[in-house]
Amino acid sequence: MLKDAVTFTLKKTDPRTKARRGTLHTPHGDVETPVFMPVGTQATVKAIKPDDVARLGDEGCGLILSNTYHLYLRPGHELVKKAGGLHRFMNWNGAILTDSGGFQVFSLGPLRKISEEGVKFQSYIDGSTHFFTPEKSIEVQEALGADIIMAFDECVQLPAEYRYVKESVERTTRWLKRCKEAHKTVETQSLFGIMQGGTYDDLRRLSAEQIVELDLPGYAVGGLSVGESKEDMYRVLDNCVDYLPAGKPRYLMGVGTPDCLFEGVERGIDMFDCVIPTRNARNGSVFTSRGPLSIKRSEFFDDFTPLDPDCDCTVCRNYSRAYLRHLFKSNEILAAMLLTEHNLHFLVRTMEKIRKAIEEDRFPELKKEFFDAYYHSGTTARV
Amino acid sequence: MLKDAVTFTLKKTDPRTKARRGTLHTPHGDVETPVFMPVGTQATVKAIKPDDVARLGDEGCGLILSNTYHLYLRPGHELVKKAGGLHRFMNWNGAILTDSGGFQVFSLGPLRKISEEGVKFQSYIDGSTHFFTPEKSIEVQEALGADIIMAFDECVQLPAEYRYVKESVERTTRWLKRCKEAHKTVETQSLFGIMQGGTYDDLRRLSAEQIVELDLPGYAVGGLSVGESKEDMYRVLDNCVDYLPAGKPRYLMGVGTPDCLFEGVERGIDMFDCVIPTRNARNGSVFTSRGPLSIKRSEFFDDFTPLDPDCDCTVCRNYSRAYLRHLFKSNEILAAMLLTEHNLHFLVRTMEKIRKAIEEDRFPELKKEFFDAYYHSGTTARV
């Protein structure tokens, strides 16, 4: 049997919660978990150079996400393959995970049509018609060459009827089998399965049982943060993470605000991704240890303190709120660049602190400290 | 008598041309000349971080330009002063030159009204009315705190009537006297005078005689590249540079395409600035040793060679034309970032080569080599 490209070492589980400390071994380096993955949708993490991404946090960032759907449409996976793969195309030497395109295709709503075979959809760029199947998604992801590739699944918008979610779970399993069958590059790329099931615990269990049977190198919890409340998301996670095997990495898709990172880790999640840190940065909103902050506010006009007095990133060490507000109000690209760097550093650094706390049996204490400052300081947390 | 903040050492003059090799000594470090200054209009060189600006070329970039007019309107010079000055506000440890606002105010056309006292104009941001005088420009520039500050002059749009240009030259001299009178921070900031006179050689001589009499630490050639042909500009420069004292630095304002840098240096110019490298980069156009190139062109879709095979910048070492075209077509901010870095590196590096050639008595040969490749290679020079 061929050796999986990506393997996982579970190093420790917190004695009081389900928080886990592990290492993902990938063809492009080891990645310490729990980990937050910056999103590089179109073969670039928006508004930051790859060498600056690699330098995020104290230990650096070694794993990013990119999007099959977007790259398939532009510039096309054949081009990326011709370039020598995504790592080389975008000058990123760390590990990459590509999603399958499922989420994006299903987000199109009336612009897509689903069948057992796959999904027909229209390009957001030129309106042209495309057909994605499990086999096609794997073909595209193999051409892109990411270390971790994701199953082509159906991500159901919540709330959703039980009957529809059940049908969808079963189709997602059939599609996963077709993905696994189609996937040939197991020694250089690892396929992760995706659990669905909406907010129905028995369907989550059903989905998990079916996909775990395929013995894949990792599993994701999909179909959350898609319309339900955070309480519902946490309630679903409370149970469903346990349906996944302890020895494999667990990835909570599309989730990554600071509060969700702590809640997810506490429930046994190892990997996260989210566009919010980069998107919010471009809209002038940043995370700080004392809660989120909008740089647009007029009170920052002559505030010469850093974005976050507790942050050690290059932005907080070198630039004032007054300057960053000036850049933002003046529509300067440097505003997006610096706010993006801060937000990503903040999350990467938070995950470093979480990893250290798990190692030292203080994860619950760190979570309490973080939340106390994040929600209750009230002195600088102004959105 | 107080010591000037900025002094100039003329180290060598090319034996066959007027090209000069010198050093500007500023409160924020020595700057080797001839030098190209990147433009940081709103307290940022657009789409590049200051630490990346400082690393441009092989030797780094130590002098940038910023704009009095823009910073006066937003965020206001009082705020910049309160921040500790422009260097600190924008996190730039090198030297800065601020223009006087004259050029921008006069570019407003019908939105400004000129009198002996100064110029009334409307803000491009909110339409509010403002009045700039020589004294006001100096007050604002002293608040900003640049190493080199510029005289408040009238920059006449070309072509222009002899009579009007003569009046304007004389008013510019009267304003320069008022600038010098108002300028108090001579030990930390040096005031440069600006020669005007349009395309009329006798008016250039008149202007030069009048401003040189004031014995300032440096002089600029203003009022060029404002509507006249390049041939006219070079013809004017052929003579007028000689009207300025050899021992003082000479700055050709607003000029900085590769060809103009060589032509200016050949005529005895020491300093240049231009928005074209940064603006063109954001529009997808770059300089290369084989001529300008537009990254938008469809032929670059699968071109995996660098922007400029002869360039050693981080962009040319790490990214292909195909990738940069993909970023540009996808409206990614990283396109502006990388193309800006390349363009600025190209000019800073070209100036380094020019300085070395002057030292080694090969400036004319370098110019010929550069122009031969830039205009006649035809293999990759495609705009």
Image: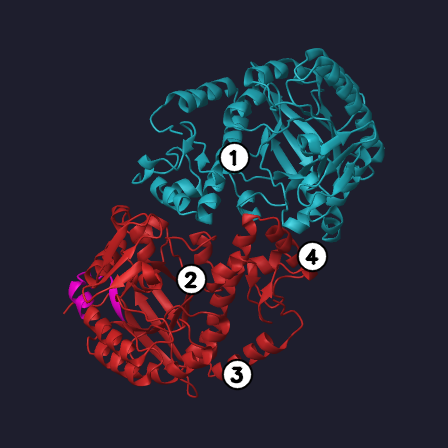
Chain colours: A cyan, B red
> Which residue position holds label 2?
B38
Q: Are marks 3 and 2 on the same chain?
A: yes
Residues A291 and B328: in front is B328
Q: Earlier in the sequence, mark 2 or mark 4?
A: 2
Number of the front mark, 1 or 4: 4
Tell me the element at label 4: loop
Residue B189 within the magenta-colored segment of the rendering: yes
Does A282 appear above or below B152?
above
Label 3 – label 2 distance at C-alpha:
26 Å
Label 1 – label 4 distance at C-alpha:
31 Å
Q: Amino acid at mark 3?
A: Glu
Number of the front mark, 2 or 4: 4
> Which residue position holds label 4?
B301
> Which residue position holds label 3?
B365
Residue B36 x %, y %: 42, 67
Q: Amino acid at mark 4?
A: Phe
Residue A196 x %, y %: 71, 21
Residues B350 and B258: in front is B258
Q: Residues within 10 Å of mark 1 (few under 14, many from 20)?
A: many
Q: Earlier in the sequence, mark 3 or mark 2?
A: 2
Q: Chain of mark 3?
A: B
Q: Residues within 10 Å of mark 3 (few under 14, many from 20)?
A: few
Q: Are marks 2 and 4 on the same chain?
A: yes
Q: Chain of mark 2?
A: B
Determine contact: label 2, label 1, CB under 8 Å.
no
